[in-house]
Amino acid sequence: MSVTTAAVYLRQSLDVTGEGVAVARQREDCLRLCAEKGWTPSEYLDNDTSATKGKRPGYLRMLDDIRAGTVQAVVAWDLDRLHRRPVELEEFINLADAHRLALATVSGDVDLSTAQGRLVARLKGSVARHEIEHKSDRQKRAAKQLADVGAPKWKTAFGYTDDYQPHPIEAPLVRDAYEALLSGTSLKGIAAGLNANGMTGRTGKPWTHSTVSLFLRAPRNAGLREHNKVIVGPGTWPGLVSEETFRAALADRKST
């Protein structure tokens, strides 16, 4: 009696806690399914990995093993754990057909060797793709709505407290930096001054001429809200410098 080795594919798009709780639930259900079918499981994991962005090492390794013939079946919690893009699904269907691959999910088996099975897989793939695009549209609309009302899109910034008020120590240093720039002080000199005062950016690293340049270009410092790199109006937080000072500094940097 031949032994069927099943690739148990586990994926979670976002693991906030880093504990892999969702993956653990998938593993439990998938291993139970393997036991019911008498398949020997071999795990392939992509935790905290999107199926629509970047590479999935576990998934790619599984495909290599399918091509090599070391696995004869694939088990996943649902089809959307395997694929979120139709183009990937089509590649998988061709691979499954070439290697007579069995596919089982906790939500139900899908026979990719039949037209009906491929239709089911494609329909589920199309629905998953629609959900992704719909989610993206909602996120873009929400971001635009926040910009329209001037709500901050940043959580922490040098010069401000955590509740978006001018920091009693850092805010005066920001104003001094703009004044120094307009008085002819170099970015390197401004960085040296901040470092001499023991000040660091929110990254905790010493200031450099490049980080000072990026910082002084931020409309946030003048209480202005930016969306898609365009200033759309005033923000709901107080500026550390006036808009006139900010724009004068910006023009000064563009002329040098």
Image (tube, rainbow, N blue to C red):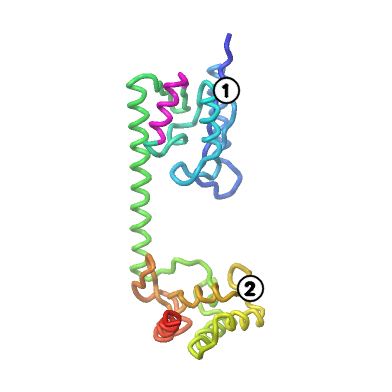
Q: Residues within 10 Å of mark 2 (few under 14, many from 20)?
A: some
Residue 18 position within the rendered picture, expressed as x and y whole percent measured from the top left:
60, 47
Looking at the rendered structure, the number of numbered marks drawn on it comes to: 2
> Is residue 138 left or right of 218 when viewed as pictured?
left
Circle 2 sits on which residue? 206
Q: Which residues are magenta?
A: 88-102
> Is residue 123 left or right of 95 when viewed as pictured?
left
Looking at marks 2 and 1 on the same chain, the residue that comes earlier in the sequence is marked by 1
198 drawn magenta: no
Q: Residue at x 52, y 35 (%)?
A: 60
Residue 32 drawn above or below residue 133: above
**Which image quadrant is residue 39 in?**
top right
Residue 167 position within the rendered picture, expressed as x and y whole percent measured from the top left:
55, 79
**Which image quadrant is residue 131 in?**
top left
User: In front here: 214 or 222?
Assistant: 214
99 drawn magenta: yes
Q: Secondary structure at mark 1?
A: loop
Judged by its main secondary structure, the magenta piece is helix
Circle 1 sits on which residue? 70
